[in-house]
Amino acid sequence: MSPTALQWTPTHGEPYRPVAYRPARMPSSESLARSAALRTRMDERRTVRAFSSDPVPEQAVRDAIACAATAPSGAHQQPWTFVLVKDPAVRQRIRAAAEQEERTSYDGRLGDEWLQALRPLGTDAVKAHLTDAPALIVVFQQRYWLGPDGTKRKHYYVDESVGIAAGMLLTALHLSGLAALVHTPSPMRFLSQVLGRPQNEKAFAVIPVGYPSDDCTVPNLVRKSLDQVLVEV
Ligand SMILES: Cc1cc2nc3c(=O)[nH]c(=O)nc-3n(C[C@H](O)[C@H](O)[C@H](O)COP(=O)(O)O)c2cc1C
């Protein structure tokens, strides 16, 4: 049976029904070997902005989305929707709308401080990745639960939950050999319109997925070292 074969239905006020959880404990030697290998592999991930139009194995993208959907979430409300856009005409519409917003942003809306922060990344208002990459994953936050009869229920820690799920999505894509970019055109309202999403959903990011183009370059960035990010007490 596939791990996703059971269908989730919304819960609200049901009693606590625990089940046993006894995963096999990994020997520490194996934990250390795996953590070291994973650290090296994750350090190889880079944001790609120049994509080949070569197709990707679609099931690998679906599997990555399924991995993202295993993320923890506030009150287990799983407040996310992933829209996988393959249709070139829809990608073209997203690009046209995104570039219109980005032109306004780069022409001054961002402000000088933001533009200075972006300068080392070499980005501009041209967003060819939106049509060059063979697939886009548009991640939506469900700001609240919307029942079929219009009932609304509050969702808790939506930003945090969707941020964690997006991180797991990027990790899964990378470990599956695929390149990605987190693109956050601002404002993103046009994505709800183009993709016909319901009123309770708000776009979080557009994630183009594919392979780097043959002439892909990335900014020469330095990541913080472990001792710059870790405080042990
Ligand atoms: C929340 C978020 C928003 C981002 N938005 C954009 C974006 O709109 N356009 C873009 O080119 N890169 C965007 N990025 C990518 C970052 O610029 C990139 O992750 C950073 O420069 C570090 O590079 P690396 O991912 O190769 O380590 C975004 C990343 C995050 C996490």
Image (cartoon, helix red, strand yellow):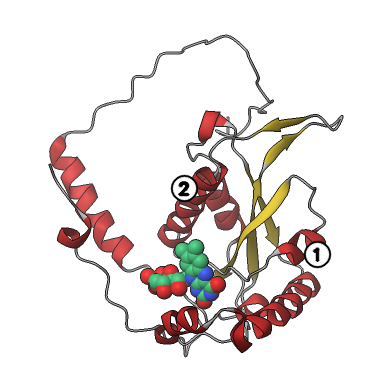
Q: How crowded is mark 2: few (under 14 residues within 10 Å), some or many (20 or more)?
A: some
Q: Which mark is residue 34?
A: none
Q: Disc 1 marks which residue? A: 194
Quarter of the image that includes the N terminus: top right
Q: Which residue lies furthest to the right in this view?
A: 149
Quick check: can you spot residue 211? no
Q: Which amino acid does label 2 sit on?
A: Ile
Q: How crowded is mark 1: few (under 14 residues within 10 Å), some or many (20 or more)?
A: few
- Residue at screen point 65% across, 60% down: 138
Q: Is mark 1 on a helix, strand or loop?
A: helix
Image location of residue 110, percent across then percent down: 57, 78
Find residue 184 and report its image quarter: bottom right
- Residue at screen point 42% across, 56% down: 171
Q: Disc 2 marks which residue? A: 164
- Residue at screen point 73% across, 63% down: 189
Find residue 120 and report its image quarter: bottom left
152, 207: nearer the viewer: 152
- Residue 128 is left or right of residue 122, and the answer is right
- Residue 218 is left or right of residue 41, and the answer is right
- Residue 26 is left or right of residue 11, and the answer is left
Q: What residue type is labelled 1?
A: Val
C-alpha gap between disc 1 and disc 2 = 25 Å
Q: What element carries label 2?
A: helix
Question: Which badge, 1 or 2, comes first in the chain's sequence?
Answer: 2
Mark 1 in CB contact with mark 2 (< 8 angstroms): no
231, 77: nearer the viewer: 231
- Residue at screen point 29% across, 26% down: 24
Image location of residue 33, percent across then percent down: 18, 49
Image location of residue 214, percent across then percent down: 48, 87
